[in-house]
Amino acid sequence: MEISYNLRYQKFTFSNRVLIDKEGEIIIYDKGFRLKGKGAQDKGELINFSEIKEFYYKDEKVIFISFAKEKYVLSETSAMFEQMLKDLYKSRNEFLVDALFMRSGKLKVEFEGKFERQSKFSKVINKGDAKMRLYENSLIIVPKILDAFSVNFNFISFYEFDELDYMLKIVMDDGQTIFISNLGEYFEPFQEKMNEILQGMYGHLVNDNLRQVFPYFNIATLLKLANKMKGGKSVSKKEISKIDKELYQSIYEYIFDNDVIKEKFSYFLDIASDENIRMGLAKDDTVADTLIRWFMITIPEKNLVLFTVLNRWKQDSNKADNHETYFYRIIMEKGRPEDKVNDKINEIDQALVNLNFVKDPCYKDKRELKHSPYQYAIRKMPFLRILRKSFMGTVSAVEVKDWHKQADEMIEKCALK
């Protein structure tokens, strides 16, 4: 894709001092665009979408601000403004779909319709015409002149089809609500396909993995577990025990598979409540016939949350392992840790599930991630930004006594001052 439009463009500093004011053109590419003045000698300025922090339009002007705090205003496109805007968003949205890891599984079908997204306080965030791309584990909504966003099926709390109003209502774990409508003759095919995907999401996990790991539990029990652990989300000891009292012990033995790891984490496991000990299992697409094993422990009274993602294969129990563990404060400014602990749990769940259990974006300095595929995600994913801000440090000693010493230092670091 390479499309150009004549326009006027201005570039300002953070203090609003004019740096450039030219008549010229914009040339739109797949991952960005070039702004250049008139004349063959003017090579212009190439701007990648990854450099843009804010992007919006108002009164037939496109305004964007770069991460370098430079402001640009595009205007005077005459009658071509709306078409230029659509082409800019079309290109930008394809970039966002990749840069923010929206795809999950294979594309099943695509429809056109309308959407409305509301906050947990029922305030409209955005709405408009869009393409609805239905994947195996997500629904990507691509508006014509707004940023694309994804509905990850692993974080759906509730959904229903209203066959009278031909509308789909989706409520997410974080309280957001999305309405999909105006699908016309495609409403029933969309309904059938989405029901098929959502109702069949956990069958493969149960049949391919959980039955092999936990053969003494029946299918109904394992399906309940898979439904709770959507995509590998953490589930509390309390919730697992409600499914089957013996199931928690089996999962515990599977995750804490040797004496060293049991001894390292015994201190936290002994003082945490059943609601605050959380475990997750996810299908591993990188190592055949294995499950990703991880756990999270929250200690609100000590203002901390920790998690560990274990190696993606069952290793020799005699082999040394540092059991690298990441510590986070529950709150940053005000309030009680008990009131905010669920927010921190959701941040960690979303970060790990959405990014396929890659840990680097959860804690590494942005300079270390400068050339990684996660560079844009750490800037733009809200849950990831908040999680990273609350990171306090890593415990990674191999020897138990050294590990406990490091853990004690981290507990002191996380404590409310």
Image (cartoon, helix red, strand yellow):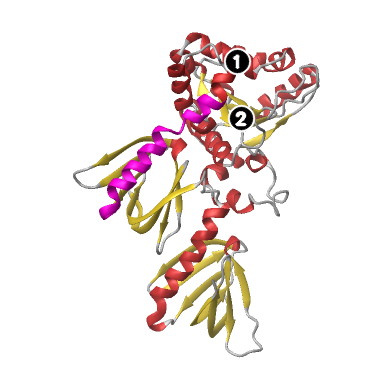
The residue to which callout 2 is attached is 417
**What predominant SS class does the magenta segment belong to?**
helix
The image position of residue 173, as x and y in percent, is 41, 35
Tell me the quarter of the picture where residue 197 sits.
top left
Q: What amino acid is labelled 2 in the image?
A: Lys
The image position of residue 85, as x and y in percent, is 43, 71
Which region shows up in magenta?
Answer: 183-208
**Residue 222 shown in magenta:** no
Q: What amino acid is labelled 1 in the image?
A: Tyr
The residue to which callout 1 is attached is 252
Identify whether 261 is placed above or below 31: above
Q: Nearer the viewer, mark 2 or mark 1?
A: 1
Please give the name of the residue rendered at 80% of the width and 23% of the height, measured from the top-left corner: 398
Q: Is residue 249 left or right of residue 107?
A: right
Q: Is residue 51 left or right of residue 204?
A: right
Please give the name of the residue rendered at 54% of the width and 30% of the height, measured from the top-left corner: 232
**Residue 201 shown in magenta:** yes
Depth check, front residue: 370 or 30: 30
Of all residues, the one furthest to the bottom in this rendering is: 39
